[in-house]
Amino acid sequence: MKVRPAILLIENNHLLLMQYRYGDTDVFALPGGNPEPGETMDLTLIRELQEELGVEVEIGPIAFVGEVIQPQTGEPEGKEDVLHVVFLGQVIGGIPRLNPTETTALAVSWKPVGELASLNLYPNVGRQIQRWLTTQIQQEYIGKIDQKFF
């Protein structure tokens, strides 16, 4: 299982997402990425957001943790299960703009928090984000994420 830190950047009740296109489907992802060898999760987020979006971020507490488990089809697909560690954060410098040399995302989008549950989201945590915003419970383990694959 690999670990993928991600970050919730919320301003004016809107969440910053990266937009991708898989076939005919728009998919939105939390900003984040894969740690390099020897890199901590907070440093991964700082590096990834600087590289991909040109912003400086402050990393806050963990909001929640959950797992995306790949479907068991009997055929090796080469995809690993992923532990998503989602932090709260804030932009402290710059304006989010895509750097196409560092990401395959097509756009950066601020989506209203109220719409998150209806988006194709990776990881699929729209409802958890909405719930987290109302309860502010820190470091919650949400278990297996019900993920649609595109």
Image (cartoon, rainbow, N blue to C red):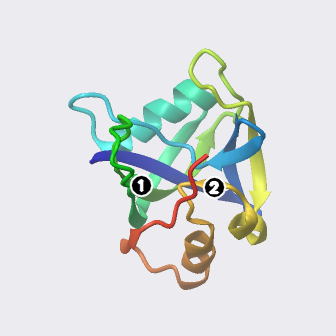
Q: Is residue 103 above or below residue 148?
A: above
Q: Is residue 145 above or below residue 150?
A: below
For numbered disc 2, what is the local secondary structure? strand
Q: Position of residue 108 (x, y in %)?
A: 73, 39
Q: Residue at x 36, y 54 (%)?
A: 72
Closer to the observer: label 2 or label 1?
1
* Mark 2: few/some/many CA within 10 Å (<14, 14-19, 20+): many
The disc at residue 121 is: 2
Give the quadrant of residue 98. top right
Q: Residue furthest left?
A: 38
Give the quadrant of residue 96. top right
Q: Residue at x 56, y 20 (%)?
A: 102
Q: Is residue 13 visible?
A: no
The disc at residue 71 is: 1
Kindly report the distance in space between the C-alpha atoms of the residues bearing marks 2 and 1.
17 Å
Mark 2 and mark 1 residues within 8 Å of each other at the beta carbon:
no
Q: Position of residue 129 (x, y in %)?
A: 58, 69
Q: Position of residue 116 (x, y in %)?
A: 71, 65
Give the quadrant of residue 115. bottom right
Is residue 135 toward the left or the right of residue 47 in the image? Answer: right
